[in-house]
Image: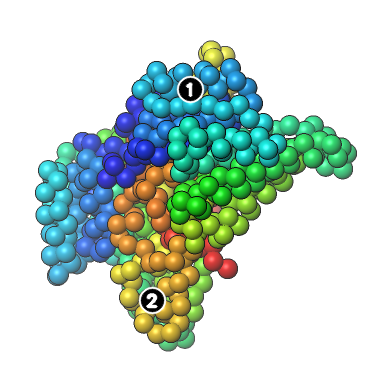
Amino acid sequence: MQERFRLDGKVVLVTGGGRGLGRGMAHALAAAGAQVMLAARTQEQLDATVQEIRDAGGIASSFRADVTDSAQVDAMIDACIAEFGGLDVVFANAGIGGGTDAEFWDYPDWAFDEVVKINLNSAVYTCRAATKAMIERGTGGVLVVTSSVAAYRASRRWAYAVAKGGVLSLMKVLSGLLAPHNIRVNCITPGVVSQRDVRDEREQAEWDQRGSFFPVKRLGEWWEMGPLAVYLASDASAYVTGQDFLIDGGMVNAGIAPMSYRPHHEI
Amino acid sequence: MPPQARYFDLTGKKAMVVGADNPAGGAIARAYAEAGADVALCALTADEAVMRARAVRRDIESLGRKATEYVMDVTLGKNVQVTTRQIAKEMGGLDIVACAPDLFLGKPIERTTDSELARVMQVNFASQYFVVRTAAEEFRRDHRPGRITLVTSVIGERSMIDTTAYAAAHGAVYSLVRAAAHELAGEGIRVNAISLGWMDYMDDRIDESENGKRAKRFPMLRRLGHADDIGGTAVWLASDFGADYIVGEIIAVDGGLLQHQ
């Protein structure tokens, strides 16, 4: 059974792999035996994560790329194949808020374009370039990463939600398009998750306070996407495709009333 | 950050699988054992079901793990409670519980009798309710962060003609997972489910008629599921670190069937 979760010999590419959830997934994927290629814009963060993985005995390399530029994305896939001899699984993970805090009606065009470019165009470019390589090999896996904001609510970050909703649709479209090529496509949807270890007691208290509103009474931790990433990249999920994996400590499920509400009504 | 080597490790865990006599339960029991757990195998009836559970036991013992078979009448809450207590005592506690009963009824609504409806609801739904209730009691007693995984069907969220009783029972299981997950999450107990699509052993609902054959081509992966396809997801959901932040989720192991429109 354990070997089904192993990724030995597989080449996995993680965009946005220098920090946060991408870093957490990269650590777990490497520990499961994968050769991990990390891509991001900030070379220092890439270097640090690659070093952490190598120090733990894993295989990792990095490529500096701005995934909103399709030429750079194509170069990133070429570099991955050149270095590791192929590409088995891609995590289109890159994406951050961007834009402005403006209300829907006041939102400037440039800001909307920026948010969509960062979150949706990047995922399209990454999946397009990566799956071209996979189709030739006749196997592969694609994971896109979105946010519970996308599917369930939008507040001031509405543009981000719209872009991430597009990523979810991209997953659904690709799962149908790529199933005949034996390429599985799934989505990871994190709820409220820390991007790094806690810094001090004051911050811990702040996170505990936010986490108290969720059924599990805590925020997710940055590394907790790791085991989910390994499961979805591995043969343990060989019959799983077209699915959205919510990892939110029960936040969305409990979303229709205050967390601790206990109605009492006798009949 | 816990040791990554232990993400999917069940070494030393005590597991109970209700419905180990059917292909899904048997596959889950084998997978738990392969991941390192000892497993109590509960057959739902005292007939040939016990023999099927015994075959699972032999497989598990050949892996060097402990396994024992029991008979559990899942339609009686008291029987579920007493048998579970006995299992927990004999195994020295309980960490993981899976429940995979499955009784399919395919019949038009106007011909479905009161007793058929009651039976379908009992075996498919009430059994799961009893198992969650009892498992939570056992986990609480020992202050263990228990894992509960229910096995249900995509018919619980999508419709098919002549499945009203079965669909309603599994729809109830879907709601049970979400409600119980919320209620028990604060105590460290995780409740999730695996929802099955069309499996190669389901000749009770996917027959050899023309439409039955067409249904087999509905999963996006263009094949029926094998019992063996369930194990990886079951182990992941049952592990200490691999899925501790997954709560009230229903994971479709269906080859993409739910994406079919």
Q: Classify residue A266 as left or right of residue B79.
A: right
Rendered image coloring scheme: rainbow
Say few, some or many: other residues with alpha carbon within 10 Å of mark 1 (under 14 / 14 to 19 / 20 or more): many
Question: Position of A173 compared to A118: left or right?
Answer: left
Q: Mark 1 is on which residue type?
A: Val
Residue drawn at x 49%, y 62% as measured from the top left = A180
Quarter of the N terminus of chain A within the rendering: top left
Whole-percent x and y of residue B165?
43, 74
- Which chain is mark 1 on? A
Res B184 → quadrant: top left
Element carrying mark 1: helix
Q: Where's residue A90, x and y in %? A: 52, 41
Above or below, comparing residue B188 to residue A265 in the picture: above
Q: Count the marks: how many?
A: 2
* Residue drawn at (54%, 66%) of the image: B260
- Decide if residue A219 is on the left or right side of residue A65: left
Q: Name the secondary structure under disc 2.
A: loop
* Quadrant of res A231: top left
Q: Amino acid at mark 2?
A: Ile
* Circle number at residue B206: 2
Q: CA distance from mark 1 to mark 2?
A: 49 Å
Q: Position of residue A117 (x, y in %)?
A: 73, 39
In this view, A155 is above or below B151? above
Residue at screen point 54% across, 14% down: A199
Please tell me how crowded label 2 is: few (under 14), some (14-19), or many (20+) other residues with Cα within 10 Å: some
Q: Is residue A2 above or below residue B221?
A: above
User: Is residue B178 toward the left or the right of residue B120 in the image?
Assistant: right
Q: Which residue is mark 1?
A: A50
